[in-house]
Image: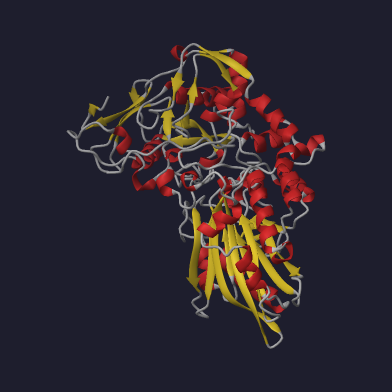
Amino acid sequence: MKNSRPGPTPRWCSCRIPDDAEQRRGVSRRQVLGGLTATSALALAGWPGAAEAATAGKGGKDSVTITIMGTSDIHSHAVDWDYYKDAAYSDSAGNVVGLARVSSLVNQIRKDRGRDHTLLFDAGDTIQGTPLGFYYATVEPFTETGQTHPMALQMNAIGFDAVALGNHEFNYGLPLLDAWIEQMHAPVLAANAVHAGTDRPAYRPYIIKKMHVHGHPPIRVGLLGLTNPGVAIWDKANVSGKLDFLDLVETAKRWVPKIRAEGVDVMVVSAHAGDSGLSSYTGDIPVENAAAMVAEEVPGIDAILFGHAHLEISERFVTNKATGETVVMSEPMCWGERLSVFDLTLTRDRGRWKVAGKSATTVNTNTVQEDPKLVALVKKQHDAVVAYVNQDVATSTEAMSAAESCWKDTAILDYVNLVQTETVKKAIAGTANESLPVISIAAPFNRAATFPAGKVTVKDIAGLYIYDNTLLASILTGAQIKAYLEYSARYYEQVAADAPVDPASWTNAHDLPDYNYDQMSGVTYDVDIAKPEGSRITGLAYDGTPVTDDQKFVVAVNNYRQSGGGGFPGITTAPVVYNAQVAIREAIVAYASAAKTIDPATFHVENWKLVRDGAPVF
């Protein structure tokens, strides 16, 4: 059985959420002494210091070392702040967050190595992830106010040389994405995002940077940008019929030779894709986490900066199957917690530069203080968001917690289902589907979510509903609902009827995240975890009567699930009867604001429970 695992840190992002300290690698705060600088942190990681770098760079005109720095999955973390706690970010591993920290590291490395020896790239997922990103996309859209997006402000100030698009860049629609790209000084790349029905890139596919390292002939560095094919699923409503997302390997096979033919000396890929070779979805969508596959199958690549999985992979070498050459890869975790640093040593061979040595490491941003210029740059925008998330929305008659939502029917998750159900009922009133029963689906996104007794703020609701999902409604039959719930119940390990009660150890079977454990309101059922997968749902009923296979229901569901996220059966092909693009989080805020009171006695119904051989666990 699995050990108990902590709930995720709240973030408005549907990517992997980092686990606790034992799954993180790199220099922790416990290793950081009072005077530890970026330079000494790099030395701890085995990276050459300034003196060694100078020796490498001045070894004559026939040899030079260049440094490529990389970020990924910043997720609108501009400064070191947790909007949910209204305090500086902290976790058990001693991490800090924000581009302001990254900026200090970048400045130090540029100073150590020489600005002419360095480049700075990013691998995507920049504009979504915290209330800061949400606020300037939906509450006070920068597209309407004329403001510069805070992440564009910071990236421009730091001086990124190029960035790749992540899947979350598409969350707020193509017009907003286009506006952000327009504000960026750095080229924004995504070679495999093409106009629908064509192979014509919708965004710039690559750049070639000419580095003028003092005392050496120019060095030409090519960078190919690749985004994640899962956009076609996760943001179907925003991209369907407009953009297609091609296979990373096939796209790299098309573009790397072309870039090489333009005479580049170094070939780098920035890919918003993990390196596992696996996908979180099924069907004919290209592989989600294909970064290492690109290294193996596409000749001519020297280094790959990658992201999406939110892991720290300091250095990984992959051998190309065709050439036998090694590709160095690095992933800098997420949120600005790490910076990837690649060293590439080049030698002159017959009048051309050739890569003779490759290495990479990651550096912890807790080794430096925030860059005060980067903090000041977004202070007004940050302060506006802090004020927004601390606004009172309603008064709760009692405290509610999501701590046990992964194994009990809780009032706080029922509140999500209440809002979804009432919104859909109102929308289908007067339509042909008005007479159908409405049920709702929700998942425990954040075990740490709470509503206090008394004033409930936007921050509290955001901590409960941490993703930028919109609400839809589809028609499912009784048979489809049963199959859906059986699929969801895979989340539990099979547990003997007489085993000690330890629910935290029963969850997350198959490494399924909490957000893939869907619970339904409006029907009653038991989940029998003593039984094998596929036969766990018992007593499925509506209004006290067993649900029949052909009985029809209107089902409130979020866009991530309806578009295929999690691979749940039946939902992607079910007829959609409501899709007004209403953000669920904002619907909850609006509902609570109108009601003014949140009283569990008026909506909390324990309609499902865990059992073992029919006997309730609790």
List x then y, in percent, for residue 38: 60, 53
So how many labels did they put on this image? 0
Residue 163 or residue 197, whichever sits in front: 163
Quadrant placement of the C terminus: top left
List x then y, in percent, for residue 617: 25, 27
Horizontal side of residue 146 vs 535, given as left or right: right
From the viewer's perspective, is residue 546 above or below residue 208? Answer: above
Residue 461 or residue 121, whichever sits in front: 121
The quarter holding residue 341 reads: bottom right
Q: Farthest right residue?
A: 146
List x then y, in percent, for residue 602: 46, 12
Q: Farthest left residue?
A: 498
Residue 200 or residue 596, whichever sits in front: 596
Q: Residue at x 46, y 42 (%)?
A: 93
Horizontal side of residue 117 vs 6, given as left or right: right
Q: Residue at x 72, y 51 (%)?
A: 158
Q: Residue at x 75, y 44 (%)?
A: 153
From the viewer's perspective, is residue 527 above or below residue 592? Answer: below
Horizontal side of residue 378 vs 13, given as left or right: right
Residue 401 or residue 569, whichever sits in front: 401
From the viewer's perspective, is residue 166 above or below residue 8? Answer: below
List x then y, in percent, for residue 140: 74, 31
From the viewer's perspective, is residue 347 above or below residue 316? Answer: below
